[in-house]
Amino acid sequence: MSSEEWTPQESDSTSSKLMRKTKESPFVPIGMAGFMAVVAYGLYKLRSRGDQKMSVHLIHMRVGAQGFVVGAMTFGRLNISLLKLFSNVCHMEHSVCLNEWQVME
């Protein structure tokens, strides 16, 4: 082996990576938390599903969890698009900066 092996520039811990990713895209952890909440609720309701078949219950649980994740991704993308749009408006009109949501003088 050569002495020039690849080493990471920074030794990030898992928690620091998670915090950095959360700052970059805050809707991903929201989607993950919602997914886990829907799955936990579905498992809690597993006992009292009545005459409903297990497969139907699991399909409903999967659809709910996926819906929450897709919703979080959609709102995150919408948020990014609006911020980019407002930052472009800010650069075009120097008197009003919508990126900061306040009137600049």
Image (cartoon, rainbow, N blue to C red):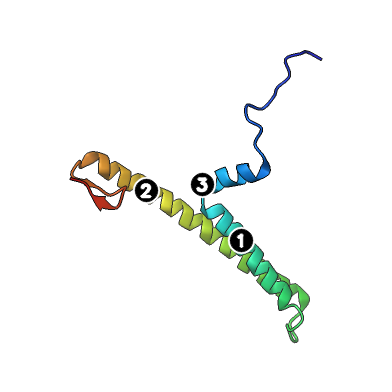
Disc on the earlier residue, 1 or 2? 1
Q: Which residue is mark 2?
A: 83
Query: Which of the 4 quarters of the picture holds residue 42?
Result: bottom right
Q: Secondary structure at mark 1?
A: helix
Quarter of the picture containing the C terminus is top left
Disc on the earlier residue, 3 or 2? 3
Residue 61 image position (x, y, % from top left): 67, 70
Q: Secondary structure at mark 3?
A: helix
- Amino acid type of the residue tagged 1 in the rendering: Ala
- Amino acid type of the residue tagged 2 in the rendering: Leu
Q: Which residue is mark 3?
A: 23
Spatial separation of the CA atoms under disc 3 and disc 2: 15 Å
Quarter of the picture containing the N terminus is top right
Residue 18 image position (x, y, % from top left): 61, 46
Q: Which residue is mark 1?
A: 33
Q: Is residue 76 left or right of residue 16?
A: left
Query: Which of the 4 quarters of the picture holds residue 8?
Result: top right
Q: Is residue 49 left or right of residue 20?
A: right
Spatial separation of the CA atoms under disc 3 and disc 1: 16 Å
Spatial separation of the CA atoms under disc 1 and disc 2: 24 Å
